[in-house]
Every structure is written in structure tokens, then in C-alpha cells.
Amino acid sequence: MGPTRRVVPFTELGRTDVGRVGGKNASLGEMTNRLGAAGIRVPPGFATTAEAYEELLAGRGLRDVVGEQIGRLHRGAPLDEVGAAIRSLFLAQPLPAPLRDAILTAYERLAEESGREAPEVAVRSSATAEDLPEASFAGQQETYLNVRGTDALLEACGRCYASLFTDRAIDYRERMNFDHLAVALSIGVQLMVRSDLAGAGVAFTLDPESGFPEVIVVSAAWGLGETVVSGQVDPDEYTVFKPSMKDPALDPVLDVRIGSKRLKTVYADTGLTRTVDTPDAERTQRVLDDTEIRELAAWSVAIEDHYGCPMDLEWAKDGLTGELWIVQARPETVQSRRRSTTLRRCRLTVVPGESLVEGIAVGEAIGQGPVVALDAPLDLDRFPQGGVLVTRVTDPDWEPVMKRASAIVTDHGGRTSHAAIVSRELGVPAVVGTGNGTQVLQDGRLVTVSCAEGERGRVHDGLLAYEEVQTDLAELPATRTRVMLNLADPSAAFRWWRLPADGVGLARLEFIVAHQVKVHPMALIHPERLDPHDRHVMDRLTEGYLDRGQYFVERLAHGIARIAASRWPTPVVVRTSDFKTNEYAKLLGGRPFEPDEANPMIGWRGASRYYSDGYREGFALECRALRRVREEMGLTNVVVMIPFCRTLAEADQVLAVMADEGLVRGQNGLRVYVMAEIPANIILAQEFAERFDGFSIGSNDLTQLTLGVDRDSEALAHVFDERDPAVVRSIQTLAARAHAAGRPAGLCGQRPSDDPAFTAILVAAGLDSISVAPDSFAAVKSHVARAEAALETGA
């Protein structure tokens, strides 16, 4: 047995050294030695060993004392009392001389190699049971940044050793059934990256909310990365599509969301760090440009490939050199452990009123109970089991409280904040970044916290009824008829990636325009026609865009791209805008561009707008967005669909306008479908088939126009019926004529979700696809399978 090695440089470590230096330090060594050739930069440093920690325990007789204190905990002693007693023992004496000398010698060597006297370093704790695929101890022990000089370094190391027994760390090991004395602590000492002068953040190699594996999600804020990890700020978020990264000519950045970034952490003048307000100019400015995002994404993919599992990374940008660095890497431990064939969904069974507060939804569950608003972690016994924790921001000290909560609400933080990460691990729904949760939600108020309504999490007044359904996707039957999805909200698209759907049969642009663009496209092109108020609001929304039309194109393209990426490479049928004039008028700046119509349902909508003087420029922006998604981002699975096309001449005019804007049917694999929702589409199906590549039946409008019934009329609701023989005959006729022309025909609508008999009619008619809402997919898939079996048996 050789001499005890108390300190080892990263250059001598690898992933097999977890038991010796902990997961964090082993990973830094692995990346230093194995991934440098891929261009990945890791700041140099060294780690103390588990042997040094065991020597520390043995030399002071601490092992027996720690064991006694843990025994007291098991006999009912308060957690905070036990933790404080153990930590005081660690801090009572200086580090043993051999360990102290080894640390200082390694620090001097680091100074020589970096060419800096007394360089500032990050001092991080790394437990030997940390960052394993089956457990995450991230944040359980302390980290100290901007540590300079020998005295400060030794003090930080002593505090790191003591932090192995913080209350939160003791509680976590108890919960995970880890033996406290079987877990050793290693300390990582790493040169600081001057991200206080630039920015930092985290990157996941899957979507942290849904587990969708085909994206890299990067969060970024100004200053040191602690504000992102702790959730003190609402960071920028950039989403990168992995398949598009394979072609350097493509732009793989699917989405860019600018966070408020109201705070940042920088170096303190007297040592360590301080948190300050972010200047106004930086709050609205992106932390990373597209080139930097792509570099980080490429590194993330390389690290994921090397480790063979999804990864959770921390990165930093040096404000002096402009270089990016990876400062931590660990396996992702929440989504990667989910059973991929089980779909768990919650939904409210009542219509909620206006929400009390809203924020980013974390998880897909619903929780409810009395509000417990706290400024700081309380003694565990004072927090009731099942309370709704409401606070400004959480850190690891909150974890014993979070474990008892039915739901969590924070004022600040994004999807990669501490509150978000821990709530996912616990399976507790959380709404983060509300901004005003602590002001609105009063102690004792009964609330329902819903993360089951898309990307936006909502807190509703009262205890609302809800249900939870689990579906084993592996048991869903195979069908000849394709069952596809209707999607509108891009932010929720990744939630449904596990569904074995055959693509998206209807992606509606109206939701993206109304909720992400928020401005009438013609108002962006002709701002001179707006009143002063609308012009002011629009100018604020489009701040930073010299070309306001580019604002529309970018927002719309990002929304379409998220939906298209969620089902790649299966087809995603994107319907161009189908607002009615009264709906368009409600958009910001819309009123000057929309006429008053007595019956907008059959008025100036769909195809008739696209070639008209009143909207052609707006449709050109839609075409630019679609071209960007298909040609620049590489999502060629997008199929364009034209709604409410009344005549053959109108079809020719729309296709000509699209071609003028670079969307040429058949070029680069572009397919163009038409909605079959007007009797003319059925009667002239053969002629429409000469102009379009497929049909999608809009059953609501087809029923309305076949029977002459206003679909919104309560007085005529008893007449409105998609199963009316005239409507059924139209569906059958279209399917036959489309197939005779070699064109597919499908249907998108709600009725198959509610009516198995109607589904059977569609299957018997020979439709190629049925497109339904995601929460109806499993039921409709089963309905289709039964209908197909009945056809085969003649039942």
C-alpha cells in the first residue's frame, strides 16, 4: 500500500475515481483528460481525496462523535441541533498539517501554471456518493467562489468539510438511505472563470421539463452562475435541436427566450461575491449569441455521447477572453429515470376562474392545500404536511420543507432554478417565476396549483376537482389508420413526445400569433396607421428589432419549429393563419386593418386574405417564417396547409403568392395540403387534387356549411351533427376522390375523441389519418383499432 495521496490534480483523474474524489471532481478530471480533443475547455484545478477525509476523521476521533450524533437523531433529537453539533466539531480546529501543506502546495502549482499570483479559485464540495445516475447530491454541500490567497483557501476548505453535515445534507442522506459515515467528502479547487464580467448558466442535454431527448436547453444570466442555479433570476433560455446540428449549414437554434435577469452575482471588493442589480440595458439583452449557443450545444452533445447518458452541465463565459468553459458536469437524474412507456396526466375537471398568479410550470401535476408563505426555512415540524410552500426563492436549505409540500410557488427562478430541479426530483408541482406570488397568496388560503395546463403554471383559488390518469403506451394497439395530434401551443409540444403518434395533423398558427407574436402582422409593416397607445406598446414589444417584420418572422418561426421538432421526422401539417376578422381585430394594432363583418365565420378569412391587398404583406411574413423553419433550420417535415379555400382560382392565386415568397410546391420536398371544409372542396375534389398534395377535413366547418347551420348557435345546436348523412356522405366522397387522384385524406377535429361511432365511420370511409387533441390520443387509438378489427371481421 503506497503513501496517502491527499491531493490529486484533475489531469490525473477520471470517471472511475468517484469513490476517491466524488462525482463532481471525477467528472472534471474525465473531461479534462478525455474531451480536450473535442475543443471542450475545463478550468484547471485539483481535488482532495477521500483518503484525506478519512485521515481527518480518524485523527480527531470525529468518526465516533459523528456516529453518536446520528444516533441521537434516530432517537428523536432535532435535526438542526444534531447538524450544528457535528459542524462545530469540524470547525473547532484547523486542518491537519499534512493536508494543509498538500492543499497549499497544489495551490502554488496552480498559480505557477496560470501565471497568476494568488489566483482566485472556486472551492467546491464533492461527496463520494454525489452525481451518480441514481441520486443527485447537487447543492447539498457548500461552494465558495472568488477565493483568493492561502488563508482564505484553507478557511473555505474547512467549511466545505463541515458542510457534509448541513441540515439539508443530513436530511437528504436519510431520505436516500445512505450511511452518513460511508460518504466521504472531496474538495475541488478550480481556477475561476471571470464570468462576473460576462455570464454563466446551465445546460441540459434533454428538455428538463418533459424529458424530450432531441434538444439541448441552455439557461443564461449575467454574472456568476449562482443566480441561475439558485433561482434568484429569470434567465434567458435557448433551445437547440440536435438533429439540425449535424449539418453546419443549418441553424439549430429552435427558440430564444429573453429572461428578466434582474440580479447578477459579481466579485466583492473585499473577497468572495456580492449580488447587485443588473443594469437595465443588460436585462433585455441576450447573454449568448447564436454562435456561442451552438458551441455550447456542440460541447453538450459531445459530453452526453462520451458519458452515454443525459447530462446536466454548468458553463461560464470569461469576460476577459470571451471564451466559454464547462465548470461542472453530472448525469441528469430526473427525466432520465422516468419510465418512458408510462404517460401520467392530470387535468382539472372543472372550469377554473381567473388565476391568482401565474408563472413557469414545473412538472405536469396538480397540487393543492393551504398556503404557507415563508421568508426563510422553518423548523420542519412547523411546516404542515401537504402545505403549499410560497416563497421568494429556494436554495438547498429549503429541501426538508419542500419535501413536505404538496406544491411550491416562487417569485423568482426559471426552469433550471433550484426550486425547479428539486421539485422535479420530488415529483411536486411547482410554479416558479411568478413575480408576485408572495404578495398575492396569503397564509392559510386554500389554493390549487396546476402545472397541467401547458407551459404556464397557474394558482387557482380554492380546492378544485381534478383527475389523474396513467396510460401504458406500450399497450396501445397498432393501427393502419394514422392517428396524429392537433397542437397549437409550442411551449407544450415537448410534453407529448412520448405518444406514439404518426405526426401532427394540425398545427394552428393562430395560437402562436396571439400569444407569442401578440401583434397584427400588418401593424408591424404599417405602424403609421396605429394610434399612439398601440404604437407605443408595439415599439416596446419589438425593441431591438430594426425590421419589425423580422420580429414576426422570428417569433412565428420559433413557435412552428418547436412543434415540428417535437415529432421529427414524422409529418407536421402547419395550417396558415385562419383568424376571422373580429379575431384579427383584437390583436394589438389590428383594428385599422380589419373590416366590420356581419358574419365573420364565412367572411374574409383563410385563402381569400393571402392574395388580397389588405393582407398579402402579412401572409408574406408567414411564408418567410415557414421558409426559415424548413430551409434554414432544416425541419423539412413541415407540410403547409391552406384553410378555407373556396375556389380553384383562389387556390391558384395562393400558390402563386407562396411561390413568389420562395415556397414552391414540390421544391425541397415541400408538400401543400388544403383544408376540405367547404362543399366546393368535395364537389371539385379532383381539380383541387391537381393543385394540392393532400386533404384534411375540417369537420366543424364542413358540417356548418353542408347543413347551413351556424356552429356557434345555441338555438340550432340540436341540428349541428357531424354524423348527419349529408356530412358523412361528403366525407366518404372526398376520401374516394382523393384516393382516386393519389392523394391522402384525413380529418382533424374533436368529434372522434368524443364519439367512437363517428371514429368507426371515418375508418370505414378509408381516411388515411385522424388527428386529435393529445389528451384524447390513447382513447382514439383504441377506437380506431376496434373499428379496423370490426371491418376485417365484418362485424
Image: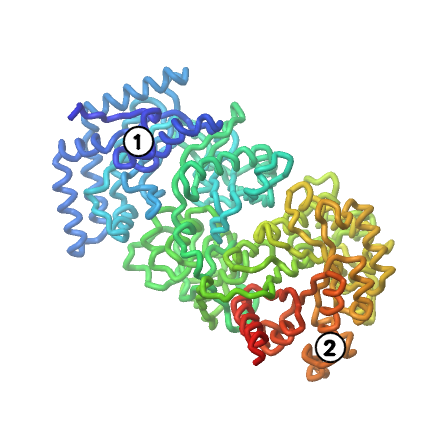
The quadrant of the picture occupied by the N terminus is top left
Residue 83 location (% of width, % of height): 23, 46
Q: Is residue 455 left or right of residue 537?
A: left
Residue 365 drawn above or below residue 726: above
Q: Is residue 631 left or right of residue 680?
A: left
The disc labelled 1 sits on which kind of residue? Answer: Ala
- At a point 22% along the width and 35% down the height, the residue shown is 91
- Label whose residue precedes the other's in the sequence (1 or 2): 1
Amino acid type, label 2:
Arg
Q: Secondary structure at mark 1?
A: helix
From the image, tell me which residue sits under label 1.
Answer: 156
- Is residue 257 among the parts visible in the rendering? yes
Distance from disc 1 to disc 2, alpha carbons, whole Å, reads: 79 Å
Question: Element at badge 2?
Answer: helix
Residue 294 in the figure: left or right of residue 88: right
Circle 2 crowding by C-alpha within 10 Å: few under 14, some 14–19, many from 20: some
Find residue 186 and report its horizontal and vertical position in percent: 27, 34
Q: Quadrant of residue 389?
A: bottom left
Q: Above or below — where is 709 with respect to 292?
A: below
Q: Which residue is mark 2?
A: 729
